[in-house]
Image (cartoon, grey):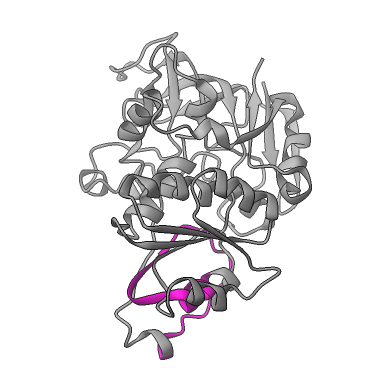
Amino acid sequence: MKALVYHGPGKKNWEEMPKPTLIKPTDAIVKINKTTICGTDLHILKGDVPEVTDGRILGHEGVGVIEEVGTAVTGFKKGDRVLISCITSCGKCEYCKKGMYSHCEDGGWILGHLIDGTQAEYVRIPHADNSLYHIPDNANEEALVMLSDILPTGFECGVLNGQVKPGDTVAIVGAGPIGLAALLTAQFYTPAEIIMIDQDDNRLAVSRQFGATQTINNRNEDAIKRIYQLTGNKGADVVIEAVGVPATFELCESIVSPGGHIANIGVHGKSASLHLEKLWSHNITITTRLVDTVTTPMLLKTVCSHKLEPGKLITHRFPIANVLQAYDTFQHADVEKTLKVILVNE
């Protein structure tokens, strides 16, 4: 089969790889129908995730069809259409029983990280019964790809960890796909204001279409000053970090209100300063999280009922064989006006 293979920071190639086989009786082999590229993949290519080694197939999102199942798999059979979760969970360990699937002792975020991932024609899924979801008839597969990672990530790590409430002022730093996923799902809780901060005018325009009440281009204006103007000099009740660089995390520290929450989503490859000399007396809560995908069943129902339409995040489509072109488009989002790309295995 062909797959997108990582060969060290800045190096990747679409090349021939062995087709995956069942290793454990709880495994399934899935033929990929559609997959995508995540901002985390770009962090890997920058060298921010050193656990990813030379020869790893990238990708942790997608939908497909079951090709083969192990003898212990009871919930799926050959021919089933499935949504692949970015998080693998055994369902039995101490962390899984707490709902912390991201820390599963025999799983967690391993696809495209510690084992071969989904930017390929086929993928092996460990613990298939707990790591796959049936796709309902007539569901939009492209929209469901957004449920593999970005939608539950924006919701769990941003909205739920930030404890968004009715009437809150929410500031989201970063209007890329993850920030937009947080924007879409924050509206479940009817905040009074959702302010998007980014340096890309196109993404800010999309944010307004998706429900942002205010936008700030922090390349052109002082975001801190503007936030305080918009909030009566109080700051935002909830600040969601959706980029993953020191400057954006430190911006979050500067715009949160007393008693507020900073909810980190971004993948950080470098240390950021924690300004406790300013925050210690302000009753601030700071949360971090790797998505657990515990909300995926609820989000799946919401998407299938068309109450939430994450397919709007898709801006480009490519045959999977053109994955290198797709990466180039995704990496130059400011020029190409890219949000999410869909890779189709024809």
Q: Using the rendered image of the protein, determine whether residue 127 is visible from the camera's viewpoint.
A: no
Residue 84 coordinates in the image, percent (x, y):
45, 29
Q: Is residue 118 left or right of residue 11?
A: left
Residue 180 coordinates in the image, percent (x, y):
52, 48
Looking at the image, residue 31 lies above or below residue 276: above
Residue toward you, 310 or 14: 310
Query: At x 43% / y 47%, what residue is drawn?
Result: 153
Residue 10 coordinates in the image, percent (x, y):
75, 52
Quadrant of the snapshot with the N terminus? top right
Q: Is residue 282 left or right of residue 228?
A: left
Residue 98 coordinates in the image, percent (x, y):
21, 48
Q: Is residue 268 magenta?
A: yes
Q: Quadrant of residue 321?
A: top right
Query: At x 50% / y 76%, what residue is drawn?
Result: 229
Q: Is residue 83 magenta?
A: no
**Region of the chain picked out in magenta, as a range:** 249-277
Looking at the image, residue 89 lies above or below residue 170: above
Quadrant of the snapshot with the C terminus? top right
Q: Is residue 129 left or right of residue 32?
A: left
Extreme residue in the bottom direction: 277
Extreme residue in the top direction: 79
Total numbered labels placed on residues in the image? 0
Looking at the image, residue 181 lies above or below residue 18: below
Q: Using the rendered image of the protein, determine whether residue 341 is visible from the camera's viewpoint.
A: yes
Query: At x 71% / y 54%, what residue is drawn?
Result: 9
Query: At x 50% / y 52%, what residue is drawn?
Result: 212
Residue toward you, 226 or 147: 226
Q: Is residue 220 left or right of residue 169?
A: right
